[in-house]
Image (cartoon, rainbow, N blue to C red):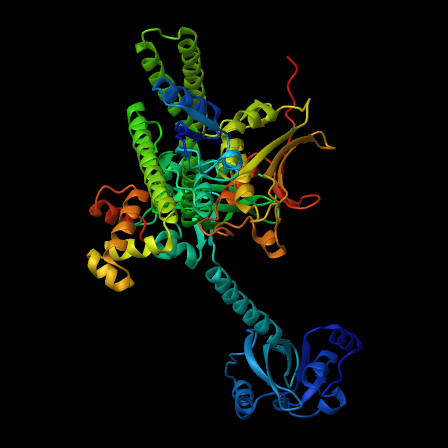
Amino acid sequence: MTAPTPEVLALLAATIDAVVIMDDRGRITAFNASAEEMFGYRAADALGRNVSMLMTSADRAKHDDYLKRYLAGGEASVLRRGRDVRARHRDGSEFSVFLSVDRIANTAPPQFVGFLHDTSLRRKALATLEQERHINRLYLDLAQVMLVATDRAGLVQLVNQRAIRVMRKPGAQIVGSNWIENCVAPEDRAAARTAFRALLMSGSDEPQISEYHVRPSGGEDRFITWRGVALRDTENVATGIMLSGEDITDQRRAESEAHKALERMNSVSRLATMGEMAAGISHELNQPLAAIANYAQACVRLLRLPAADIPEVSGALEQIAGQALRAGEIIRRIRSLVRNEDVRRESQDINDLIRDVHGLLASDARVHDGRLALDLAMQLPRVMVDGVQIQQVLMNLVHNAFEAQGAEHDGAPFEVRIATRLTDAADVEVSVSDLGPGLAGEVEQRIFEPFFTTKASGTGLGLAISRSIIKAHDARLGYRANQPRGACFYFVLPAHQELPP
Amino acid sequence: MKDMPQTVFVVDDDDAVRNSLRMLLKSAGVHAEVCASAQEFLSTYEASHPGCLVLDVRMPGMSGLEMQHELNLRGATIPVIFITGHGDIPMAVEAMQHGAFDFLQKPFRDQELLDRVQRALARDSEYRARLRHTDQIRERLASLSPREREVLDLVTQGKANKMVAGDLGVSQRTVEIHRAHVMQKMEAGSLAELVRMMMAVAP
């Protein structure tokens, strides 16, 4: 047994793999630092002992036989070929190593060198990787969104369960096929291609949004909103795309239903407001009609008299003409209210709108034994509004104010005031205030909620709809306590900047 | 009590309606006075003034219904014709339940109004005449002496002079004299007429 030369020792010390040299009887003749670390033996303890102490009990029994067979002229399967074996640590624990053994040339009796590479870490890494893959798959499949990855050509590389469910076909029919040709609704393919190309060309990792329909097999098209990013290789070249899609078909449908319902509510409210005011309107219209009938019938009687009083008859005829015009004016105002046209925003003078609806509001006031006062600021900027809608809001607010008047009002007529003023920001504030009981705290909190009402026969929609109308005018319908008492509802309309001609 | 002219009182807050009603009534030869509010009418109205009332149901301040209630409290008997708009039928029903004479829906034919006004005025004068008649009977009753009143009560119970004399413990001749005074003071031409008079003032 010859001791290794210093060069060999240096080489052994520097080798990261464990190196064990043994003689023809299996005794350890060299045991490097890495081997010490791997097996837990110090070199001094290992030298001279049988190498089988480093093996599991299963291998240990066979090792001497392998060695003898080789020395007797047989083949050794282990030589020059590496293989995975189990090794045994000094503490008895076992671990996996990649072992390669060679006979050291020109040694007689022969010596063998073994290189041992600890593969536990690699195995562990592989296992971890496998688990990560599994978790990633779970992530994909748990996701509430559709996930689709394609290559540059648009061939699907990966889909998750959600996408499979939406498309109603097996994953195998999707993966490998062209995403756009196979899954996107024909009408939307052009748009999908454009979005696909834009993604591949984009230099950004910022998700890009697109929306198109997919066509499930044997089902209705689904409308999907997609967030897409390009997949890139290490050279930053786009190799494909990844899409996450949310099925918004039902949501869109619900939104559209809600929109329709709101539209219906708007016209219902207008009709309801009309209904509430119908008594006032019919009274209002009956007055001139009754007066006309009376005057006309009086004229007939007067003219039948032998000496007709012509000045009296002509005075009555003038009254008839005046009352007919009064009736026409009432009808004109009613027509402008029941018109159910689209929202038309025009540059308007808010004071004109208020004066225009004043007559009708005043008749509401009369029905409620009240008075309507106007406090309109001069020289206000014009506003971009739908006049009819703003008038509807005013009618609702004024009507509410009269309805809310307390039982006691000191004998004096209950007064509701419509005021306009210029705000500090040079916008136009419109307010409807009264000197009634005002709103209690909990009522104030909920007053704009749909279906919340303090009236016995109220729908609870008036204020909610008024608020949505004002919101549609980029403004807010608000409430504040009136000074010195009562309620005040107000909204601020942005001043409309007239373009210079 | 001398006859005052009958007046149709019109109470309506709408100038045009009020004035056209006055003109229509005037053209039909009916004397009308107009008021713009219930308060104005109540402050000037005297129950002794014969006529009828044409009253708008819906008015600011005191409504027609409230005014009717007030008149009922005062014991006023003036017939009330309500004029109403289309939406006021329930109010009209309520008004009728509280003793309104009639109601009219605006706008109306002049003859409809004038017929109702004539009927209301007839009702008022009939009522007032009846009232005058019973007042007269009471006045005449008050002029009887206690003994004459006793004779009247027994005679109108259907008793003959002889029985009356027996009841009162006087001679039949004395009863005859009292009875003649009763017929004269009561201005009754017959016993039957005397009985009718007593029934008219019976409580």
Location of residue A119 with respect to A275 vertically, above or below: below
Location of residue A174 with respect to A420 vertically, above or below: below
The residue lying toward the viewer, choosing from A78 and B165, is: B165
Location of residue B58 with respect to A35 vertically, above or below: above
The reply, left or right, for residue B82 in relation to residue A477 is: left
Residue furthest toward the right?
A6
Picture coordinates of residue A84, whole percent (x, y): 55, 77
> Residue at left 38%, top 56%?
A165
Picture coordinates of residue A441, whole percent (x, y): 63, 55
- Looking at the rendered image, the quarter that the N terminus of chain A falls into is bottom right
Picture coordinates of residue B5, whole percent (x, y): 40, 27
> Residue at left 68%, top 93%?
A49
For residue A417, what is the image quadrant?
Answer: top right
Q: Is residue A489 visible?
A: no
Picture coordinates of residue B73, whole percent (x, y): 46, 48
- Looking at the rendered image, the quarter that the C terminus of chain A falls into is top right
For residue B133, what is the image quadrant?
Answer: top left
- Total count of labels: 0
The reply, left or right, for residue A56 in relation to residue A427 is: left
Q: Is residue A175 visible?
A: yes
The residue lying toward the viewer, choosing from A470 and B36, is: B36
